[in-house]
Image (cartoon, grey):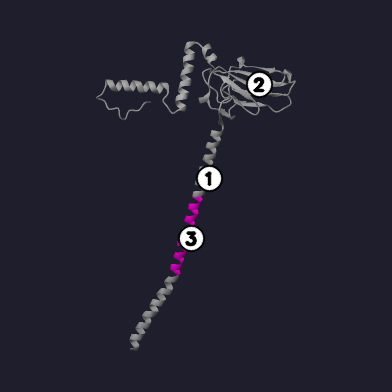
Amino acid sequence: MARAYTRYNDSRNDVSCDTAWRRPSWRRWRGAAAEAQRAAKEAAETTEKKLESSVEKNSMEVAKEEGNVRQPNAGNGLNLEEYSWTQQLPEVNITIPVPQGTKSRFVVFDIKKNHLKVGLKGQPPIVDGELYKAVKVDDCFWSIEDGNTLSIFLTKHNQMEWWKSVIKGDPEVDTQKVEPENSKLSDLDPETRQTVEKMMFDQRQKHMGLPTSDEMQKQEILKKFRSQHPEMDFSTAKIA
C-alpha cells in the first residue's frame, strides 16, 4: 500500500508540477492574444477614421467645385463683387465700379495675350490674373464712363467658344445655359451662324443627357449600315 501510495503521490506531484509549469505560458499567450486584439481594433478604427476623412474631403471638394459654377446673368456672364462681365462669342465686356470723378490717368491697365491686370494707381489691383482664354491684345480697349465706371472690351482669340470666367480661379458661369442674342446671330454669315446654332443645340442635348448632333449622325449611319447588312451581329458595336 505504501508503495502504491508513493506512486500515486509521485503521479499527483508530476501532474501538479506540470500544471504549475504550464500556467505562466498560458497567461503569456492569453495576454498576447488580447494585445493583438486591441491592436487590430485600433487599426480598424484608424482606417475607418481615415476613410471618413477622405469621404468628407472629397464631398467638400465636390461641393466647392459645384458652388463655383453659377447661373449666367442677362449678358451670359456673372456679376461679381469686384466687377461684372458679359460676353458674346467674339468678345467679353467687363465693367468695374470706381470712385466718382476717376480720370483716365489714375487707371493702371496691363493686358497681355493671357493675362489681365487692372486697378487704380497707389491701390492694390482690382483684377490681376491669368485670362480664361487668349485674347487679341491689339483689339482690346478700355475707357472711363460717367466718371465712375471702368469699361473694358476684350476680343477673344477663339471667337467660337464661350468663356466660363474672365480670370482663371474666379467663379464660373454655366456655359450650358448661355444664350446668344438673336440680333447677334442674324449678323453672322450663314456658315458661322450654322456652327453657332449647332453648338447651342449640342449644349442643350448634353444638359438633358441626350446625344449631340455628331452622335446622332453616327447612330443614323450605324442604323443604315445595319439595315444593309442584316447578317452581321452589331450587339457589341460601340459608337466612338
**Magenta residues: mostly which secondary structure?**
helix
- At label 2, counting other C-alpha atoms closer than 10 Å, the crowd grade (few under 14, some 14-19, many 20 or more) is few
Residue tagged 1: 53
Please tell me which residue lies in front, 53 or 93: 93
Quadrant in the picture for residue 91: top right
Provide the secondary structure element on which disc 1 rests.
helix
Location of residue 190 in the rendering, given as x and y in whole percent from the top left corner: 48, 11
Residue tagged 2: 110
Name which residue lies at 46% across and 66% down.
28
1 or 2: tag closer to the N-terminus: 1
Provide the secondary structure element on which disc 3 rests.
helix
Residue that protrudes farthest toward the bottom in the picture: 1
Please tell me which residue lies in front, 35 or 16: 35
Magenta span: 24-47
Q: Please say if 93 is above or below 61.
A: above
Label for residue 35?
3
Location of residue 232 in the rendering, given as x and y in whole percent from the top left corner: 26, 25
Location of residue 215 in the rendering, given as x and y in whole percent from the top left corner: 40, 23
Location of residue 44 in the rendering, given as x and y in whole percent from the top left corner: 48, 52
Which amino acid type corresponds to the residue marked 1 in the rendered image? Answer: Ser
Position of 71 with respect to 21 (left or right) is: right
Which amino acid type corresponds to the residue marked 3 in the rendered image? Answer: Glu
Which image quarter is the C terminus in? top left
Which amino acid type corresponds to the residue marked 2 in the rendered image? Answer: Asp
Please tell me which residue lies in front, 10 or 211: 211
